[in-house]
Image (tube, rainbow, N blue to C red):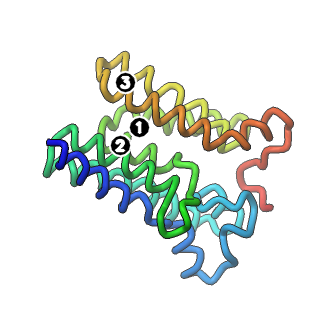
């Protein structure tokens, strides 16, 4: 069983470490994504290139790598393997070996993992994200607020193991957004759709 979980974790990591934002922007011939805006490889920074199509493709790719990891591992190894693969995918996105362990902040992959494990919570996350983003125009704030709700919803739905796992992932998500939190507090955080 431990061997299965370790394999699922490794499989998830490899899926999660695929840097879709960097790959897609390079294929499109834009400048290195890490040299513009926040320097992040995620969809929000891709949007700062002005290419909404690439940003949407990055978002979908970063989500689906989490979903695919969870579903494939769950099909082969069961629910515990699915969770292990999800954790692996999240870590892989944050710390991809191909980019010297400097990856994204994990929001899209977080959603994709949640979609594979308990889709109603993923829908709730997206609904909250959209509402907060429309009101305040800050992608980071929307993600932070939505992520807090997820473990609470999972616990309320009596998915206690998933609630514990996503409480941990949410804590890591907040840590990865510590610079954004500082900028939000200082009023210097970049708004959605704003270049640079």
Q: Is residue 131 above or below residue 97?
A: above
For the C terminus, give its image quadrant: bottom right
* Of 179 and 47, the residue lying toward us: 179
**Element under disc 3:** helix
Can you identify the residue that label 1 sits on?
A: 122
Can you identify the residue that label 3 sits on?
A: 154
Q: Which residue sits at x=29%, y=58%?
A: 11
191 left or right of 105 in image = right
Q: Could you classify mark 1 by the number of other residues whose Cα lies within 10 Å: few (under 14), some (14-19), or many (20 or more)?
A: many
Can you identify the residue that label 2 sits on?
A: 115
Mark 3 or mark 2: name the one nearer the start of the chain: 2
Q: Nearer the viewer, mark 1 or mark 3?
A: 3
Mark 1 or mark 2: name the one nearer the start of the chain: 2
The picture places residue 24, in percent across and down from the top left corner, at 53, 74
Q: Is residue 140 above or below residue 15?
A: above
Q: Which residue sits at x=17%, y=48%?
A: 4
128 left or right of 72 in image = right
The CA distance from mark 3 to mark 2 is 13 Å
Circle 1/circle 2 CB separation < 8 Å: yes
The picture places residue 137, in percent across and down from the top left corner, at 72, 42
């Amino acid at each position: 069983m431990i061997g299965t979980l370790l394999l699922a974790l490794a499989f998830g990591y490899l899926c999660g470490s695929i840097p879709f934002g960097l790959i897609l922007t390079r294929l499109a011939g834009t400048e290195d994504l890490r040299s513009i805006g926040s320097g992040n490889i995620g969809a929000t920074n891709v949007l700062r290139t002005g290419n909404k199509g690439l940003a949407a493709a990055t978002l979908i790719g970063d989500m689906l790598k989490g979903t695919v990891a969870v579903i494939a591992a769950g099909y082969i190894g069961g629910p515990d393997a699915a969770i292990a693969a999800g954790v692996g995918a999240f870590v892989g996105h944050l710390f991809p070996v191909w980019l010297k362990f400097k990856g994204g902040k994990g929001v899209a992959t977080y959603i994709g993992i949640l979609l594979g494990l308990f889709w109603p919570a993923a829908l709730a996350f997206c609904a909250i994200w959209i509402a907060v983003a429309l009101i305040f125009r800050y992608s980071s704030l929307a993600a932070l607020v939505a992520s807090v709700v997820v473990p609470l919803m999972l616990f309320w739905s009596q998915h206690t193991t998933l609630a514990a796992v996503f409480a941990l992932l949410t804590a890591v998500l907040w840590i990865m957004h510590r610079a954004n939190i500082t900028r939000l507090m200082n009023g210097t955080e970049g708004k959605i759709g704003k270049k640079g």
